[in-house]
């Protein structure tokens, strides 16, 4: 039994490393689009975020979120999702096209980067009009095994260790 648990932990660690490598690769492929001139400040910021995502086991959830947002853009004609909080301040999220606002230029750095999350979940939310919100919920339900549910009065779906909440609102600041 001990050997089996040890092997399972080893496989989980390898999977976490692979998820982080994939997140880094997808991000690096899009860096030039986001910042034609990659400064030391931007490179340090990206490296800090990669390290944070790796330490907190959130790379897989970010990849799932990237897939969802790419599908929303393709299928629903959304350019960049209006977001608040964590996503709005993430350079990785900006590179991946999850938000349309450059967090480095805007001086944004989410407080989440200051601490490790441990076993907690990261909450991410998007705001849109009711029709777009409903279409995004249907899209998410069609893409992922786990279906969206009401969570604290807001429709949400769990993407590994990230909760994506679909909020009603007309906030279009990206």
Image: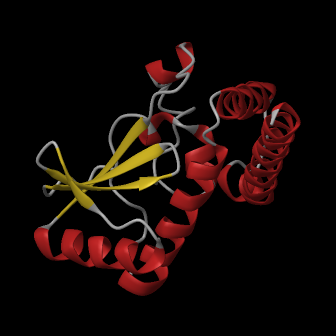
Judge left or right: residue 113 versus residue 39: left
Identified at 42% across, 75% down, the residue is 72
Up-down: is 61 above or below 148?
A: above
Task: Where is residue 76? Give x, y as percent.
Answer: 36, 82
Task: Where is residue 30? Give x, y as percent.
Answer: 73, 59
Task: Where is residue 24? Give x, y as percent.
Answer: 78, 48
Up-down: is 130 above or below 28?
A: below
Q: Is residue 97 visible?
A: no
Up-down: is 73 above or below 121?
A: below
Q: Residue furthest top?
A: 114
Q: Residue furthest bottom?
A: 75
Which of the pair 152/72 is nearer the observer? Answer: 152
Which of the pair 160/99 is nearer the observer? Answer: 160
| Quarter of the figure that contains the N terminus | top right
Identified at 29% across, 49% down, the residue is 173
User: Would you identify the image quadrant in which residue 123 lies?
Assistant: top left
Give the total number of marks visible in the rendering.
0
Task: Where is residue 134? Give x, y as percent.
Answer: 20, 74
Identified at 66% across, 52% down, the residue is 34
């Amino acid at each position: 039994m001990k050997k089996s648990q040890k092997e399972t932990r080893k496989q989980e660690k390898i999977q976490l490393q692979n998820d982080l490598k994939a997140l880094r690769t997808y991000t690096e492929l899009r860096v030039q689009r986001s910042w034609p001139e990659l400064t030391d400040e931007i490179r340090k910021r990206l490296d800090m975020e990669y390290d944070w995502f790796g330490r907190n086991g959130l790379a897989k959830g970010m990849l799932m979120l990237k897939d969802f947002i790419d599908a929303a853009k393709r299928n629903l004609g959304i350019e960049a999702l209006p977001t608040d909080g964590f996503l709005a301040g993430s350079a990785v999220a900006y590179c991946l096209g999850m938000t349309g606002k450059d967090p480095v230029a805007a001086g944004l750095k989410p407080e989440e980067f200051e601490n490790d999350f441990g076993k907690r979940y990261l909450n991410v939310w998007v705001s849109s009009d009711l029709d777009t919100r409903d279409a995004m919920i249907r899209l998410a339900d069609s893409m992922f095994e786990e279906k969206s549910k009401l969570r604290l009065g807001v429709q949400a779906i769990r993407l590994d260790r990230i909760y994506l909440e679909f909020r009603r609102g007309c906030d279009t600041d990206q």
